[in-house]
Image: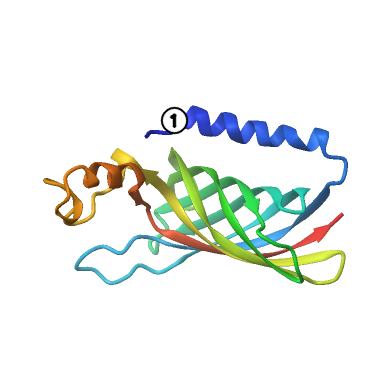
Amino acid sequence: MYISRAAVLATFAGLLLLPAAAPAQTVSIGPRMSFVQPDAVEGAPDADRDRYTGGALRLKLSPRAALELAADWRSTTSEDAAVRVRDYPVQGSLLVYPWRTAISPYLVGGVGWYWQTLEALADGEVLSAHTDRRFGYHGGFGGEINLGRRATMFVDYRYRFIQFGDDAEPAAGEQGAGAFGIPGVGSIIDVFRMSHEGAMWTAGVVVNF
């Protein structure tokens, strides 16, 4: 089973149109901070987490669902001041709440667009620049804590660049005659196999309007 990028984008665009038919909406906006952990490289120590600052805009569709648009920013310069790296990730997500209380857990999933610009510097001046762009899916879980009626604090954990099926890396023992020695089971597992590139923690506070 393969879910195309176009199908996901069409579904997400349809969700964006839902608020027009839902009069009881809550808009929330505020700052957030993200810590991105890259995948560990075999034979090398774990890489340090990259810290981003940004903001989140959340639109409550119903007591059980909300949309989020989040944008982050990060800029680092090499020790010799010869290269500067600027990262601009943007994520659009659907939040699903199994129940609502003072502490409300939620599932999060969506799409992301990631821009990274490398600039060659000399005496603080930009000599040349190159921008790479990536698209990817993300998913995870988190929770909200109500800070009165007008503010909400949230924390969540997200897997980045999620892939399923043929695009995912096979697990050991799932190829050949079939997983667990049962013919055909391996192909079924292939459909639901998931891989990802790193993960991220996000935390922030939004003001509810």
Task: Please name whichever residue, 1 or 129, is drawn nearer the observer in this view of the structure.
Answer: 1
Task: Please name whichever residue, 98 or 106, is drawn nearer the observer in this view of the structure.
Answer: 98
Task: Please name whichever residue, 57 or 124, is drawn nearer the observer in this view of the structure.
Answer: 57
Residue lying furthest front = 182
Q: Horizontal placement of 42 versus 34: left or right?
A: left
The residue lying at 49 percent from left, 61 percent from top is 200
In the rendering, at what x and y percent does residue 127 appear? 43, 41
Q: In which quarter of the image is the N terminus?
A: top left
In the rendering, at what x and y percent does residue 209 appear? 87, 54
Label 1, secondary structure: give it.
loop
In the picture shown, does residue 23 fall above or below 26? Answer: above
In the rendering, at what x and y percent does residue 48 appear? 40, 69
Q: Quadrant of residue 176?
A: top left
Q: Which amino acid does label 1 sit on?
A: Ser
Q: Horizontal placement of 40 versus 69: left or right?
A: left
Q: Horizontal placement of 70 versus 153: left or right?
A: left
User: Which residue, given by chain and number where applicable, does mark 1 sit on?
Assistant: 4
